[in-house]
Amino acid sequence: MDRKRFIRTSGLGIGLTLLPLTIQCQSSDDAGGLSMEVGAKIISDGEGSVLNVIGDIQTHKLRGSDTGDQIVEWVSDVEPGVGIPPHIHTLEDEIFRVVKGQVEIMVDGVATVLNEGDVAFAPKNIPHAWTVVGTEKAKMITSAFPAGIELMFSELADLPAGPPDFAKVSEICGRYGINFV
């Protein structure tokens, strides 16, 4: 095969290979079309949308609507003893960053106490859980990607106060690809 034909042929192959990735990276605009535009956003420490998600006080800093549905990020400010039982995400990966206090995190059966400055990665389809340990509140920044889980958190925050109805919580979480183990 001559050089020009090779370049034309391989260029087409690469283009067809990358086309689905290009389309996947685009997001929908309000009119239902595809858009690559995502605006910059600065969020001060005291800003964000605060949700009480079954005792996990979350301040949502970035939502999918801010990031082209790429990532959502929230800050949890949680009392000792509060945590999330073992569960599996089927849609998103999560990164946990401890800013203050101590959080015991279990990822794939291995429990570790995270201290200030420590980070943990929990990929989708891997069981994980976390609990605030020690005697002080913990502040933790969590990122999930792709975005979408913030919609589940809004539904959970709308549940009546008091002890959670685990069947209802499981049903809501299940609709967003999260299952308790």
Image (spheres, grey):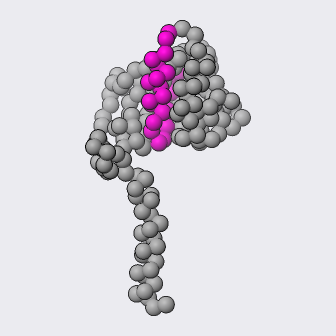
* Closer to us: 173 or 14: 173
Query: As drawn, is 145 to the left or to the right of 89?
Result: left
Query: As drawn, is 97 to the left or to the right of 15?
Result: right
Q: How many marks?
A: 0
Residue drawn at x 43%, y 53% as measured from the top left? 24
Looking at the rendering, in which quadrant would you find the C terminus? Answer: top right
Residue drawn at x 71%, y 35% as measured from the top left? 110
Residue 49, position in %: x, y? 37, 23
Is residue 152 within the magenta segment? yes
Residue 3, position in %: x, y? 44, 88
Q: Is residue 65 visible?
A: yes
Up/down of 10 relative to 68, above or below: below
* Closer to us: 14 or 50: 14
Residue 11, position in %: x, y? 42, 75
Q: Quadrant of residue 89?
A: top right
Q: Quadrant of residue 19?
A: bottom left
Region of the chain picked out in magenta, as a range: 137-161
Is residue 41 within the magenta segment? no
Q: Is residue 107 visible?
A: no
Up/down of 160 relative to 110, above or below: above
Residue farthest to the top, as pictured? 162
Residue drawn at x 40%, y 20% as measured from the top left? 50
